[in-house]
Amino acid sequence: MTWELFVFLFLAASGLISALLVVRAREIVHSVIALATCFIAVACMFVMLSAEFVAIVQILVYVGAVVVVILFGIMLTRRGIMESEKR
Amino acid sequence: MNLFDFCYGIIHWLVDLINNIWYWLGDFLPWWFGDFFTAVGDFAASHGHIAVMAILLEVIIIIAIALINVLNFIWLDRKFMGRMFDFYGPYYVGYKIGGWLQNLADGIKLFVKEIITPAKADKVGFLLGPVIYVGSSFLALATIPLGRQFYVGTNTDLASTGVGASALIAFAFFAIAPFSILIAGWSSNNKYTLIGGMRSAAQMMSYEIPMLLTVASVFLLAGSFGFMDIVAAQHDIWFGIPLFIGLVTFIVCLAAEVEIQPFDLPEAEAELVEGWTTEYCGMRFGLFMMTGYLRGYIGGALATALFLGGWHGPAFLPDPIWFLIKAYTVFVLIEWARWSLPRVRVDQILDIGWKRLLPLAILNLMIAVAVKSMGWF
């Protein structure tokens, strides 16, 4: 097993697990954190494919714009959705 | 000799030194154990291992320089504020060197304080906020070259151009901060922190656009995304002179990005207790504060590299010294505005961002296009 394969498996696993967490998380902000993780994993994958520019733009545009998703998530959802019952 | 070669030499010397003792030890042991010793020693002396260790040493050197600069900045900030407000600033701890040790004393105080997580806080976000903030800011530091030979690099082939698109990398990581701030503000489960986080997000998102537009004009003139090419293109004339509007816009946007005084709405003490850092205490707050100043240093370094000619200067001082002098000058200018101007109101801040700075940035871009099409660069 080469190091490249190991890194690829790690990135693929973190991307898939975080993508799953986006859907499964109970709170919207948690799923947004998982979304940012997923984007960063994809950016690292682009670096491995030696497409550095796409990776940088991925981080600059997508991870930067995740903030807007949080803002919409906080402003457009009811407070009951944002707070789970058992804390 | 660049920084990588320097670190490579140091690590190579260390490995040789340790390997002498290691092989000598291996001679005493039976042959199957001696073979193991030889294999480990050969691995330690291989090019890949030494190169990786050299990169780690480079990172340590760059971070050490940045942290010393942060200590200087905090001290400079306090002293300058003291002079402007007609008092002395810190002078008791480290009396001989002007109270410079006060920051270390504060750091030790923050270290020994208890770290409290509020009971109603969101644990994951509360922990992740400072981590992302500090981590992304240190990553933004990685690509900034302090001199012709003084930058984080992996081999000597890159010496002429540096890492491609390194300026874009720095801005990409610089732009992650509002995400962590909003996470920290939301997860504290406090109205003040949430309002602070919202203000921070609105402010940073809207000042990012004029900032990146002014930077685009620099990319246009230099014809490259890399810091090395951008600074090398300023050998004859600094970009700050033809693009003076861009320089002013950039510094104002920088003050808004690192949230210092005229634009420190997210942590307005009079309205929100301490903004989005209200619920953080101990070293977590210390990390936020330190990273705030670190972002000030990164901002000054970015303005220096993009507009003020980077390390270019008369040759009697080495490159990194010129770079740091310019970065400190930018920081002191921002601090001067910080202690002289009142805080802008919350309805004015987006006005300034969208109605004043964005047209200025576009005008600056048009000037850059005109200058470029005249063939002057």
Image (cartoon, rainbow, N blue to C red):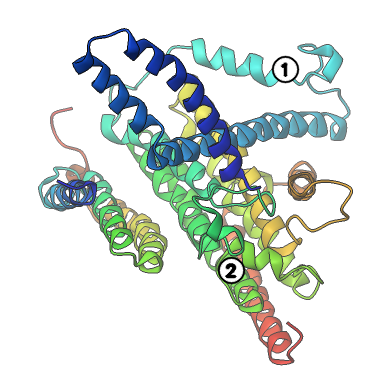
Q: Residue at x 27, y 9 (%)?
A: B29
> Can you tell which quarter of the image residue B116 is in?
top left
Q: Amino acid at mark 1?
A: Leu
The location of residue B76, given as percent across then percent down, is 77, 33
Residue occupied by mark 1: B101
The chain identifier of the residue carrying mark 2 reads B
Please name whichever residue, A8 or B292, is drawn nearer the observer in this view of the structure.
Answer: A8
Q: Is A34 on the left or on the right of B50, as rendered? A: left
How far apart are labels 2 and 1 at the CA level? 38 Å
Residue B231 marker? none
The chain identifier of the residue carrying mark 1 reads B
Q: Is residue B28 above or below residue A7?
A: above
Q: Is residue B78 above or below residue B17?
A: below
Q: Quadrant of the C terminus of chain B?
A: bottom right
Of tags 2 and 1, the one toward the viewer is: 1
The location of residue B371, given as percent across then percent down, is 73, 85
Please name whichever residue, B297 or B86, is drawn nearer the observer in this view of the structure.
Answer: B297
Please name whichever residue, B69 or B250, is drawn nearer the observer in this view of the structure.
Answer: B69
Residue B210 marker? 2
Q: Is B154 on the left or on the right of B105, as rendered? A: left
